[in-house]
Amino acid sequence: MKQVVWITGASSGIGAALVRQYCNSGHYVIATARSKQRLEKVISSCSKPKNVTILIADLEKLDELPQLISNLWEIHQGIDTVILNAGIAQWGNVRDTKIEVENKIFNLNFWSPIQTIKLLLPKMQKKGFGRIICIGSIASQFGQRNLAAYSASKSALKIYMESLKEELYNSPIKVQIISPGNIKTKIMSSALTSNGEKLNKIGRAQEKGMSPEKLAKKIYRFSKTRRFHKIYTGIEGLALPLHRLSPKILYFLLRRRYAD
């Protein structure tokens, strides 16, 4: 069945791969990001580019979200699936990171998707159907140095979504969250440093990570299930049981890695 799917953060990385995955699978896609040029490049790589609509927006501007959602809903007279993928990474220690930088991280990673969900829920409930998928992170599962605000924002999103899942248990609206590990994207190059500047470095872990295309296929399959949360990782996923069973060993190993 052909659906209308809205994907944010669609101009690169996971978002771009999701646009291609859903478009190539025969769905109508609305792709949102700040750069029209980059979105057009993504659309040109789709098998059915006419099925993709560009909707430019800066999702950090929370006061503009009500009008954005109104415009979005009018394109196809409704939305079936929403994938809230837009986000920003971080690399900076707690002491030196300015509160303005941490606010920026929380605005895009937490408050923006939450406000978006609040605006979409009444419309989806009136329609009688809807699926909301948030892209979280394995970083939400345990603390790491230089990622405090990022990890906290993703952890807050995960718990919020879990609470929402329970509130919607008997509702036709379904919510899901994906927690990827290292994905081969340039997310760290645009990560915010302590003073708010871009890191402009490719993360070594990301270079060895899963391809966005592979992850997009997994997310597409998962979206057809009734499960709430799924973690997709490579070998870095071993940190999760280690954190649960022996955090002392995990942090010993992480400190050795930081020293390299």
Image (cartoon, rainbow, N blue to C red):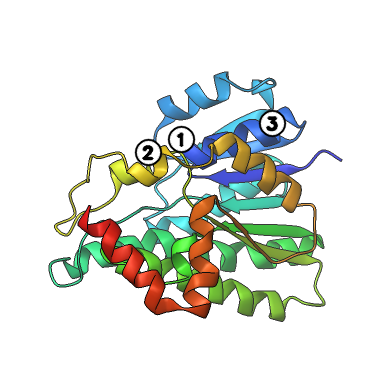
Name the residue located 70 percent from the left edge and 66 percent from the top edge: 228
- Residue carrying label 3: 23
Q: In this view, does 36 lie above or below 164?
A: above
Residue 207 lies left or right of residue 3; in this view the side is left
- Residue carrying label 2: 186
Helix, strand or loop at label 3? It is helix
Q: Residues within 10 Å of mark 2 (few under 14, many from 20)?
A: some
Upstream in sequence: badge 3 or badge 1: 1
Q: In what quadrant of the picture does the N terminus appear?
A: top right
- Residue carrying label 1: 12
**Disc 3 and disc 1: Cα gap in Å?**
15 Å
Q: Where is residue 145 in the image (x, y as percent from the top left)?
A: 27, 66
Q: Position of residue 39 (x, y in %)?
A: 48, 29
Name the residue located 71 percent from the left edge and 45 percent from the top edge: 220
Q: Is residue 87 above or below residue 39?
A: below
User: Mark 2 or mark 1: which is in front?
Assistant: 2
**Disc 2 and disc 1: Cα gap in Å?**
8 Å
